[in-house]
Image: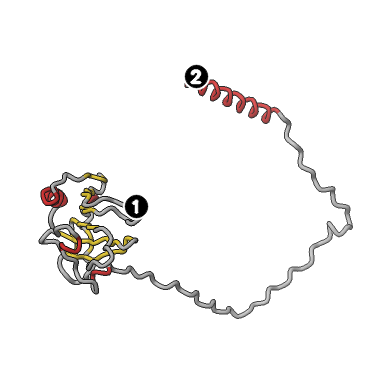
Amino acid sequence: MFRVREAIGVAVFVAALAWAASALAQPPVAKPQPPPAVPGSAATAAPPPAARPVTRPATPAAPQAQPPATRVQPPAGSSTEPAPTDAMLGVRIYPAARYLGSYDAGKGQRYYLFGTLQPFAEMVSYYRTELRDKGELVFDTPPTHMFDVGKFREDTMAFPPSVTIKDYTWNGSPGYANPKPGTAPTAFPTVIQIVAPPAQPGSIR
C-alpha cells in the first residue's frame, strides 16, 4: 500500500512539473494598444475645465442603535430555589458544600451544583468512600471525576444519574465564581454536580 501511494504521489508531482514547464514555454500574449490620436481630433483637444465642487453643510450622522446588553442569568437556585436535600437527590451532599443553584437538564432532570473550598482530590476521595465506588476520571484537563449512582435509561433520562467532581483551579483559574456577589468566598476551587433520576409520578421532590 505504501509503494502504491508513493508511486501515485511521484506521478502527480511529475505531472505538475510538466504542466508548469509548458506554461513557462508559451510566449506572452501581447496586449492590444489603442490607436494613435489624430491631430485636431477630440482625443487631442484640451479637456474641459473641471467643475468646482459645491460645498454643502455636513449632516450629522444618525446615532446607530446599540444592541441590548446580554445578561448572564444566574442558576435558579442562587436566589429563589431552595437547596435540595440528601433525600431529594438520593445522594449524601458533602456537609461543608455550598449550594450554588441548578440548571434544567431535560426530561425532568436537573444539574444541582455545590461549591466547596476543599481540593479536587479530597472530594474524589470523599465520594469514593461515600459511594463505595472508585468512579472514573472522565477528563484530565480540567480534572473531572464522575461516579454513576443509577442506571441510565435513554428513553426517560437526559443525563446519567451521577455525582461529578470538577477542579475549577485548573490552568491558574481562581475557581468557580460565587453566584451571590458580595458574599464570601468569591470563588470555589471545586464544584460537585449531582444529577438524580427523574421524579416518578406521585413522588415528592
For mark 1, what is the residue?
154
Amino acid type, callout 1 = Glu
Q: Residue furthest front?
A: 202
Quadrant of the image containing the C terminus:
bottom left
Please name whichever residue, 103 or 180, is drawn nearer the observer in this view of the structure: 103
**How far across and down, in percent of the image, does residue 146 sit?**
22, 49
Q: Position of residue 137 (x, y in %)?
A: 22, 44
* 3D distance between C-alphas at marks 1 and 2: 47 Å
Q: Above or below — where is 181 with respect to 114?
A: below
Q: Residue at x 26, y 67 (%)?
A: 202
For marks 1 and 2 on the same chain, the one whose residue lies earlier in the sequence: 2
Q: Quick one: SS at disc 2?
A: helix
175 sits left or right of 132 in the view: right
Q: Tell me the mark number nearer the camera, choosing from 1 and 2.
A: 1
Q: Which mark is residue 199?
A: none
- Residue 167 shows in the view: no
Q: Residue at x 73, y 31 (%)?
A: 27
Question: Which residue in the structure is indicated by mark 2?
Answer: 3
Q: Residue at x 32, y 60 (%)?
A: 105
**What residue is rendered at 24% in x and 74% in y?**
80
Rendered location of residue 62, percent (x, y) = 53, 78
Q: Is residue 82 placed above or below 191 in the rendered structure?
A: below
